[in-house]
Image: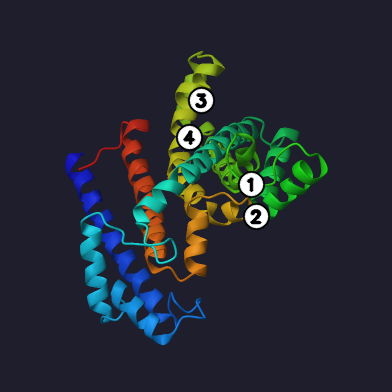
Amino acid sequence: MLKYSLNRLFWIVLVLIAVSFITFSLMHLVPGGPWDREKELAPQVVENLNEKYGLDKPYFVQFGNYLWGLLQGDLGVSYSYQDRGVTDIILDGLPKTATLGGVAFLIAILIGVPLGMAAALKQNSIIDYVAVFLSTLFASIPGFVLGIFLVLIFSVSLHLLPTGGWGSIDHVIMPAFALAALPAAYIARVTRASMLDVLRQDYIRTARAKGLSERIVLVRHTLRNALIPVLTVTGPELAYLITGSVVIESVFSIPGTGRLFVQGIAQRDYGLIMGTTLFYAFAIAAANYIVDVLYGVVDPRIRYE
């Protein structure tokens, strides 16, 4: 297990280096620069700024300097936030993004798993049809569209919730539901399919034939084995909820890392773009790593060599 964990951590480091190289290359291939938005800047001022931030050096020298700083835990500085460190900026927005993603993930699990279980246990009934319809509906609606509908209903029409911002639980409800809709639908469909497959297995019929109660059969034998495919998708879904908050944070004006990423692109802030991209890459890699480790917890038959 230790050898497997160290091997995965090594590959995560390689992935982050590859992501940094690709992102850095794409930023420099796009015409223009971070000072193009400042139309009033004189050419001499732009020259001085490029020299100050090392943008006048060759591409590979710039990337080497950035990579050396990255290995020391330095994500560089932001060009549009008055020389503030990118790490500090991301840490300011991270609690908002983490809170939003965590609440959305909890909503997705609490809706998706019971909905999928109910559909599987009542196959071909009205409950199954309603569950499949709801999962298909929410899987078809983009999060930002659902967010706009929620604002129109609960903010504009009913005046129950604020249209955006951050500060209280009221500001979390609508964006969390808008963000959780697609993962909840996906988890419900995977749970339903997995439950139906497990319920048809011989060991389930054997457990019932032995006289075990339906509750024990469901919890101890069915649900635990059916959770393995569900666990497989929860890792990427958790990463999606963190990275997918980019659009939702912009719709609801939430000052999280997603909104910082959008602002960094709009302002051609190289440091901010690199920092947020690497943060998202690390979140996805870490989520997949945690899921792989949890396989052995859920299913004792799985062993890592």
Of helix, strand and loop, which one carries label 4? helix
Residue 268 is situated, as x and y percent measured from the top left of the image, at 46, 71
Toward which corner of the image does residue 192 lie, by quadrant? top right
How far, Cα to Cα, is label 1 from label 3? 40 Å
Lower sequence index among marks 1 and 4? 1
As measured in the structure, the alpha-carbon distance from the residue carrying label 1 to the one carrying label 4 is 27 Å
Mark 3 secondary-structure assignment? helix
2 or 4: mark nearer the eye: 2
**Of 172 and 299, the residue lying toward us:** 172
What's the residue at 17%, 44% (across, down)?
3
Q: Amino acid at mark 3?
A: Arg
Spatial separation of the CA atoms under disc 3 and disc 4: 15 Å
Q: Secondary structure at mark 1?
A: helix
- Quadrant of the rendered image containing residue 69: bottom left
Question: Mark 2 or mark 1, which is nearer the start of the sequence?
Answer: 2
Count the numbered circles shown.
Answer: 4
Give the CA separation, mark 2 to mark 3.
45 Å
Sort mark 4 into few (<14), some (14-19) or many (20+) by Cα contacts within 10 Å. many
Q: Residue flagged by tag 2: what amino acid is it?
A: Phe
Residue sitting at x 49%, y 29%? 223
Residue that numbered label 3 is attached to: 205
* Residue nearer the viewer, 141 or 227: 141
Residue picked out by circle 2: 144
